[in-house]
Amino acid sequence: MKSVPELSGRSILLGISGGVAAYKAAELARLLVKAGARVRVVMTEAAGHFVGAATFQAITGEPVWDDLWDVRMPNGMTHIDLTRDAQLILIAPATADCMARLAQGRADDLLSTLCLARDASCALMVAPAMNRQMWEHPATQRNVRQLAADGAQIVGPAAGEQACGEVGQGRMEEPATLFEAVLAHFTPKSLAGRRFLITAGPTAEAIDPVRVITNLSSGRMGYALACAAARAGAQVTLVSGPTALEAPFGVDRVDVVSAGDMHGAVLRNLNACDVFISVAAVADYRPVAASDRKIKKNADTLTLELVRNADILADVAGRPDAPFCVGFAAESHDLDSYAEGKRISKKLPLVVGNLVADGLGGDDNQVVLYDANGSHPLPRASKVTIARAILDHISRLLKD
Ligand code: CTP
């Protein structure tokens, strides 16, 4: 991963308390360091039973801190000095005991003292990890509420199989999710208060119970847009065709299969939406009737009769109360004329065009933005970078 502008040069204290999930904190530290953040690790005594300081020192390139009485800091005030240039303390994993101590404002080890002594400009993010019974206990729930009331952001815990073999809520969120939460924390909230509805991925039109008509869309562009909009503070609903991608952090995902399902889901979620971005590669046609039995290969040729699907974007954009609508045009040739043609015919303020050879399915993309002022080519970049640029363009047009 390359350096991420929102995280580059940020100073983050990664607090690790004593839970099995501490081993995942190494991956989290690596993600943050690779993104360009300065990460300094503070371990509790109990954390040392699960992971070693040498691991974190190697990953972060910084000394690891675990002692309130450490005299390595020039003025001997580790609990003050470590927090003064930190913009975020992220505790992952945060055990039940760690949270109880933070909720009480205790200051009897380095990590709890740092949290108490931190500057108002230094945020606190907590990723709980514990057995499900410990998580559900009223005392823990009381502590979580207290921490949230004191201004901490609580990320997770997730549900699933636990180290103890039980199943339930209490797993620490995965490092990639925590990384996303940190990134969202540092992203300016330029889209706060806006509601986005985004479609992504392919659709699949049933031929029979085991066969579909679909296309090569990976969904990555739509997911990157949903993720970037959520990071920028928008409330995002993502209507997704079948993809192999995880729902982005902070995004409400609605799974669909066919173009008809997608159309229904879009209309159901259109209420109070400010921006609709139609990224999905929606099948233009579907079989007239899906066979309810598997079609057998009895004949040498087989003809499928197809019927046209409704155009979801044109339907939404044609409404009297239409939100700001953005279309995508993936073309094999004559990009300018087709993309601009779609912008005019579907009555869209913005179309994002690309040649299929440049983007479909891959990690990178090269796009041209078409609006009422003409065409604006963007340099070739990752879909994440392109997503940011598209959102910036939308923000500018919304302000006009
Ligand atoms: N779109 C849609 N519903 C459809 C077909 C397309 O909402 N049934 C949207 C796509 O999500 C995209 C835009 O319309 O934002 C353009 O889609 P594209 O497939 O490129 O163009 P079409 O309008 O289908 O025209 P053609 O296939 O002839 O290029």
Image (cartoon, rainbow, N blue to C red):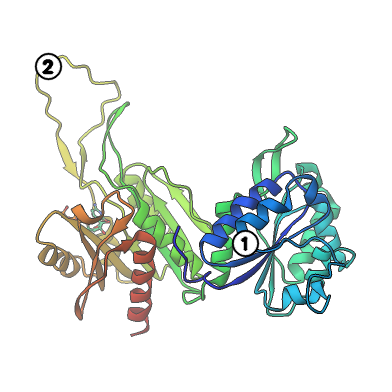
Q: Nearer the viewer, mark 2 or mark 1?
A: 1
Residue 167 shows in the view: yes
* Label placed on residue 31: none
| Residue 104, position as x, y percentages in the image | 87, 66
Q: Quadrant of ligand 1?
A: bottom left
Q: Disc 1 residue type?
A: Gly
Which image quarter: residue 292? top left
Give the quarter of the image for residue 169. Answer: top right
Judging depth in this view, the residue of 37 and 314 nearest the camera is: 37
Quadrant where the C terminus is found in the figure? bottom left
Question: Residue 302, how many percent across, how many down?
Answer: 12, 24
Q: Position of residue 186 (x, y in %)?
A: 56, 71
- Residues under labels 2 and 1: Cα distance? 67 Å
Residue that extends furthest to the bottom in the rendered view of this protein:
400
Front residue of this view, candidates 70 and 152: 70
Direction from residue 282 to residue 265 in the image, left or right: right
* Nearer-the-camera pick, 13 or 226: 13
Q: Which residue is mark 2?
A: 299
Give whichever of discs 2 and 1 has the lower sequence position. 1
Label 1: which residue?
61
At a point 49% along the width and 65% down the height, the residue shown is 230
Q: Residue at x 43, y 58 (%)?
A: 269
From the viewer's perspective, is 90 left or right of 66? Answer: left
Question: Is there any visible trace of residue 322 in the rendered image?
Answer: no
Q: Is residue 296 above or below residue 260?
A: above
At 36% from the left and 53% from the top, the residue drawn is: 220
Q: In the rendered view of the protein, which quadrant contains the N terminus?
A: bottom left
Residue neighbourhood size for the residue with mark 1, other residues' Cα within 10 Å, grouped as few (<14), some (14–19), many (≥20): few
Q: Quadrant of residue 385?
A: bottom left
- Amino acid type, mark 2: Ala
Q: Please, which residue is most extreme toward the top here? A: 298
